Image (cartoon, rainbow, N blue to C red):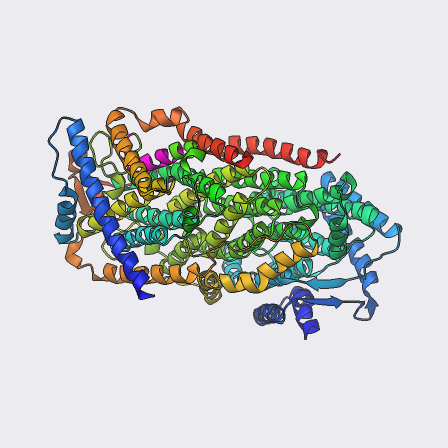
Amino acid sequence: MTLPIIGTLACLVLAAFTGGLLGGIDRRLTARLQSRQGPPILQPFLDVAKLLGKTPSVTNAWIVPCAILTLASTAVALAILLRGGDLLLILFVLAAGAVFQTAGALCVPSPYSHLGAHRELLLMLVHEPILILVFTGIAMCTGSFSVADVFREQAPLLPRMPLCFLALGYALTIRLRKSPFDFAASPHAHQELVRGLLTEYAGPYLALLEIAHWLETVLLLGVCALLWHTSLLGMAMLALGSFLAEILLDNATARLTWQWMVRRMSPLAVMGLALVNLLWLYVA
Amino acid sequence: MVHLFVFCCIVLPFLAGAVVRILRRNDLRRILVPITVAAMAAAAIGLGVAGPFRLEVRHLAGIPADAVLTLLETALPLCILLIGWRAGSRLVMGLTALQLAGIAHLHRTGPEIAPPAAIAADGLSLLMTIIVCVVGGLITIYAMGYMDVHESRHRPPVSRKPRFFATVLCFLGAMNGLVLFDDLRWVFLFWEATTLCSYLLIAHDDTPEARSNALCALWMNVLGGLAFVSAMLFLRQSLGTLSAEEVLRRVCAMDVRTTATLLPFAFLCLAAFTKSAQVPFESWLCGAMVAPTPVSALLHSATMVKAGTYLLLRMAPAFAGTTMSTIVALFGAFTFVGACLLAVGQQDAKRLLAYSTIANLGLIIACVGINTTASATAATVIIVYHSVSKGLLFACVGSIEQRIGSRDIEDMRGLRAVMPRTATIAAIGILTMLLPPFGMLTGKWLAIEAIARATQAMPPILGFVALGSALTVLFWTRWAGAFIRSPELRERPSPGPQRPTVLFALKALCGLALVFSLLAPVVLERFIVPAVTEAYARYGQVAALPAIPGTGLAWIYGLSAILAAAAWMARKAARNVPDRAHCPPYACGAAVESGKEAGFRGPMDAFVPTRLANCYLRRHFDEAWLTRAMDTISTAFLVVLVGGLL
């Protein structure tokens, strides 16, 4: 009983470390793409360590439980994935984390965090249905929503759900806060609102959210990796490939606005893409 | 013992209602109403513990049950006819006259084969009885405090409270009768009784708006009643029986289901859609908002709208695997996403709740239409847990409206500073609607699992449900975030005066919403799964599917334990934040604080308070346009539903 728990906790720590490392790679790569030197790879850890060491500074006490519950929910969602649990449950618990984070941003009388929170809600509106559709696609291939059952499948899933993978990439862009969907909590100044959702989270509480974001990155890349579960190399390639593609996309679309994406009905188009894939699986 | 319990559930509320109505004494009512409600709840739980049973009622107080039925069956439509005549509504009169003609025809033809007045309760009806008695009962107790304040504001010339509580008690009794009886004629009698009660309750304030909205509810539900009578006529013609069990057995024994056998079920679906306020008929439920809030709480949670879904759930095995069933599923899923879209644009808390109810009923109907054991389980879970959480939320909005004089979500901004207890309870109610491990989410999860395994039209149904489910997260979170606005580190508001009955009902409902979710595995195991698997196996329609997802429901405990521990830690951490950690909200360096208000330094060094508002996306979620579009599409669905069979 205790061994699996310790194992899961160790995996969570490792996942957080990987997430931070990926963040560092992201910053370095982005800098190089923009002809800058960029920070050291370990910079995200230094940042978080510095944030954790700061004296707390909050507008009202409600921010604190929201930050802690966000981290807890994200960690639980990742733990469920690691333990081979139910995909839908992962989605719901992850959504709970996002709900707490947004509720915390709504609880303070700050116009910036409010604006960010409302934008975050709109983004959730787009990526949640996509994730539900993609997870159902996986379930249609394996016969159940359980992650453990994916690994009992003999053939990789990607050839059967290529359109779902594209849709997953779209959701990944939103969750990783990449351009053009970085308008709720963008770390860069090319949006008119910088760090909107996170404005009022400061010091150690911001550090908690940062760690939650690392875990979420690992979780979503893990879901990408599920689509080529038959070989370790395939999983790594798929996860890293998606991640690098996101970085490239982020740098290539800095001038693309979300209004343009919405006007072109892209969220609905992507949901349609995933649905077409499901239809295909359904007929097959 | 069972006799006594059934008497307490069905007959006692009518008797108590009559006493309350006739004697009109305040002190008597204050004692009688809680006692009746407690007796009903105890009896319902007693029935639930005793398990499924059958009971044949041949005599009621010495009179043959059939004679009583005939008398009531004629008297009730006549009563509605009278109301229609008084209100000068030809529509109501015409529909009721048609109903009367149908009932007369039902009596004229053929001998009755099924035993009269049989009560057959399975896990599903027992669970419904418990919900009606416990949640409905708590709302009745809530209403005692609420109506005192309501009357002190509106000051009618004669107190209308006796009439109100009499109607509420009759409503609960009728609902219990509806779910417990097996004979469709009795079910219809109670069906019409709920229509009449809801009319009386909606019209309670007797303003012109209340009267016209009540009349709208009346004609739509009488239309549903007419569809019910037609269904009974067809069933009598094609199957020769009106016992629900017998009807199901005979239909399911058929190899090929023809138009003649499916048509009555199409009509029953129509009846259920009107009662459950599905899209072309949603206006009556939104109009019902004019009534005092306990009425909305009753209509939306335990009674009325759940009657429609209950009827559908009961009759579903009869049309499992048909195209009609698929159309029902598509219709439900469409209503789900449509009503969620409408809810996004709502600033009025009661309207938001109303659209969310319609949406959840749509999800239930989608599950019923998928028509497998798994989907029926999901539907029942949503019915049960929606009742508790929605009853709680309406009760909260009612109290809030009585205190702050508005039910606008924007006016509830920072409500915790004014009504700390109610705001906290309302926030908990909202969280139980959308977060794991609470019952509503379990239901949604089971629903998506069931939809993923559906054999017909799965992708569009899934698309609708996925979109709708994301929309619910949007509007619930937006509302939950509005209760707190304090720029202080810790506000220590003192609770204002609150009626003890109101506070008791709120606390009890809140506790129920939290604790009942933990009982989900027990509820599923004891009531829902046996009833559902038995229903589908007995009528031999669909191969038994695992009703519970493979991972089991033990996750509820694990997840609850982890999240409770996290919540406890979070609370402790929030308490440990030192006072010096406080800072004003970020305002680009222009932040200034003036007393309790947050703001920034504006032109001429003047203090400009920060004004916040939620974004309701009216331009994209315009109510009038959406309603028109949805009414058109859903009417097309209904035409296909009935017309497709002909």
Does residue B100 appear in this view? no
Left or right: where B449 falls relative to B90: left
Q: In which quadrant will I find the N terminus of chain A? A: bottom left
Q: Is residue A53 above or below residue B345?
A: below
Q: Is residue A72 visible?
A: yes
In front: B346, or A190?
A190
Q: How many numbered circles does the render carry?
A: 0
Magenta stretch, main secondary structure, is helix
State the extent of the magenta-drawn residues as a range. A167-179
Image location (x, y in percent) of residue B607? 20, 40
Q: Residue at the location (38% across, 38% down)?
A: A127
Instruction: Give the camera-side residue of A230 and A207.
Output: A230
Residue B206 point in image, percent of width and height: 61, 49
- Name the quarter where the C terminus of chain A is drawn: top right
Q: Give whichever of B364, A281 is nearer the camera.
A: A281
Tell me which corner region of the image, top left, top right, bottom left or bottom right, holds residue B547: bottom right
Q: In the picture provided, is A92 more to the left or to the right than B163?
A: left
Name the residue: 42% across, 26% down.
A265
Q: Is residue B268 magenta?
A: no
A145 w.r.t. B458: above or below: below
The answer to whether residue B245 is above or below residue B450 is below
Place of residue A176 in the rendered image (x, y in percent of width and height, measured from the top left): 29, 38
The quadrant holding residue A168 is top left
The percent coordinates of residue B235 (x first, y second) are 79, 48
* Residue B179 falls left or right of residue B65: left
Please check the rendered image and state whether residue A168 is part of the magenta-colored stretch, yes or no. yes
Q: Is residue A7 left or right of residue B155?
A: left
- Res. B578 image quadrant: bottom left
